[in-house]
Image (cartoon, rainbow, N blue to C red):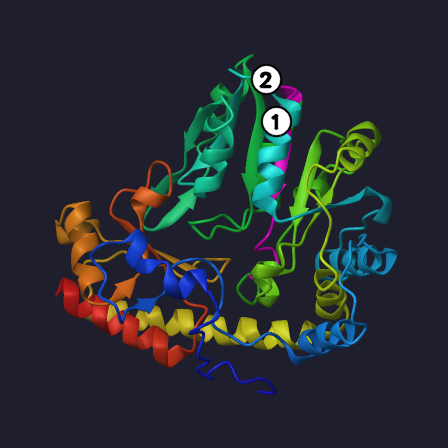
């Protein structure tokens, strides 16, 4: 391999949330624990990205910055090359991360008391963006059979038909279950939303991180004439650039897009984030492909280890993301006991309590670290539950 994903990089002293927040969040953790939780990677950024950022630093001034035409062009080229989705650069609006966009769209498109629907289990900020702004979350529980998660379309249809339901948060690849939805599922989902005049915000931040042999399908690609949709994308997960706070919103509705831009709902890009995005999309595709190979091998290793040493766990390799979603209900421990045992063993993972609803007895484990580190974390978890 051209790139070394086995390299252990010391993140101490970098104010890393992943490394330093554990003891404040989880009181059971020892000081020297393994942080396999929040969704950023322990891999070095691609050298082409770092070089582009260095070149920008050499210009010496880091003032207010616009989203350049070059950045928009690179983003559109990536969408067409990777997903066959022909996009319009004029539809792109900058956002300082997708979470910021979730809050902004709830404030802009709904009123206090309106309902916002999404599938559960769910990424916690979906719930926060709704509740913290006086709106009402509508949970549509996914169905799990043998570790495989599917949409309960009967339940979802009932929820979307409610007159008070104004907005749907879509997440694909799905966090935390790792589902990559099929064209048939996406078509049915979109038809349900739009036939009930429910606006869709589609969070597709993990779009590049699907297992080899699978392909992500942007929801908007299936509904090219539809204006009631915002597609949220970013290089942050794919290229380990979460700290750049840089995301793209594709907003096809002209009026909404002009309003969004005029009112600076999500701020300006930094002087470095645009250069990083261009480098990632134009020059780092081979880095991403090697990363995907490495992650696929790590998931295969995880399944083998847990299958051998935690036979009561239900373990499936997710179709997308670098996040494992493991059912530990077979061990008969309370959720608090599961958290206590694994945490005291020195591994920081996330548990069902962090994923809104329909997530009891699950743990989410981040595999985007050198494989030796992941293996050590798995061994500790196995010893804690044996």
x, y percent for residue 339:
21, 53
x, y percent for residue 152:
44, 32
Q: Is residue 31 magenta?
A: no
Picture quarter with the N terminus? bottom right
Q: CA distance from mark 1 to mark 2?
A: 7 Å
The range drawn in magenta is 195-209
Q: Is residue 91 above or below residue 233?
A: above
Pick whichever, 162 or 164, lies toward us: 164
> Which numbered dot is residue 111?
2
Q: Is residue 200 magenta?
A: yes
Q: Is residue 98 above or below residue 230?
A: below
x, y percent for residue 97:
61, 49
Label 1 CA crowd tier, 10 Å (few <14, some 14–19, many 20+): some
Query: On the image, numbered disc 1 is attached to which residue?
Result: 107
x, y percent for residue 120:
41, 37
Instruction: Say how many tags the image has.
Output: 2
> Which numbered dot is residue 331?
none
Residue 240 occupies quadrant: bottom right
| For residue 324, side relative to residue 242 (left or right) | left
| For residue 91, side relative to residue 110 (left or right) | right
Residue 214 appears in the rendering: no
What residue is shown at x 47% (from left), y 29% (from top)?
Answer: 132
Label 2 CA crowd tier, 10 Å (few <14, some 14–19, many 20+): some
Q: Check disc 2 and report its element: helix, strand or loop.
A: loop
Q: Is residue 18 above or below residue 352?
A: below
């Amino acid at each position: 391999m051209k790139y070394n994903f086995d390299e252990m990089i010391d993140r101490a002293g970098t104010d890393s949330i992943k490394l330093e927040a554990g003891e404040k969040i989880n009181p059971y953790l020892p000081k020297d624990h393994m942080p396999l939780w929040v969704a950023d990677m322990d891999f070095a950024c691609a050298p082409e990205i770092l070089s582009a950022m260095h070149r920008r630093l050499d210009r010496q001034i880091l003032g207010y910055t616009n989203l350049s035409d070059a950045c928009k062009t690179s983003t559109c080229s990536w969408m067409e090359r990777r997903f066959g989705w022909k996009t319009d650069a004029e539809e792109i609006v900058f956002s300082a991360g997708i979470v910021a966009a979730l809050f902004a769209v709830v404030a802009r498109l709904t009123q206090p008391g309106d309902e916002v629907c999404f599938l559960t289990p769910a990424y916690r900020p979906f719930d926060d963006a709704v509740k913290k702004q006086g709106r009402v979350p509508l949970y549509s529980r996914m169905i799990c059979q043998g570790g495989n998660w599917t949409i309960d379309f009967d339940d979802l249809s009932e929820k979307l038909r409610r007159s008070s339901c104004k907005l749907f948060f879509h997440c694909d690849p799905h966090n935390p279950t790792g589902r990559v939805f099929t064209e048939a599922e996406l078509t049915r989902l979109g038809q349900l939303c739009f036939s009930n005049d429910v606006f869709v915000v589609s969070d597709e931040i993990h779009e590049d991180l699907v297992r080899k042999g699978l392909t992500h399908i942007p929801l908007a690609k299936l509904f090219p004439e539809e204006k009631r949709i915002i597609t949220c994308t970013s290089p942050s997960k794919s290229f380990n650039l979460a700290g750049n706070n840089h995301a793209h919103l594709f907003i096809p509705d002209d009026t909404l897009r002009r309003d969004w831009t005029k009112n600076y709902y999500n701020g300006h890009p930094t002087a470095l984030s645009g250069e990083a995005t261009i480098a990632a999309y134009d020059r780092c595709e081979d880095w991403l492909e090697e990363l995907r190979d490495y992650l696929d091998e790590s998931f295969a290793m995880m399944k083998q280890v847990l299958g051998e040493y935690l036979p009561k766990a239900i373990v499936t390799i997710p179709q997308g993301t670098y996040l494992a979603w493991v059912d530990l209900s077979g061990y008969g421990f309370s959720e608090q006991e599961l958290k206590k045992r694994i945490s005291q063993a020195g591994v920081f993972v996330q548990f069902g309590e962090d994923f809104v609803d329909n997530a009891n007895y699950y743990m989410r484990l981040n595999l985007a670290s050198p494989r030796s580190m992941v293996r050590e974390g798995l061994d500790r978890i196995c010893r804690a539950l044996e």
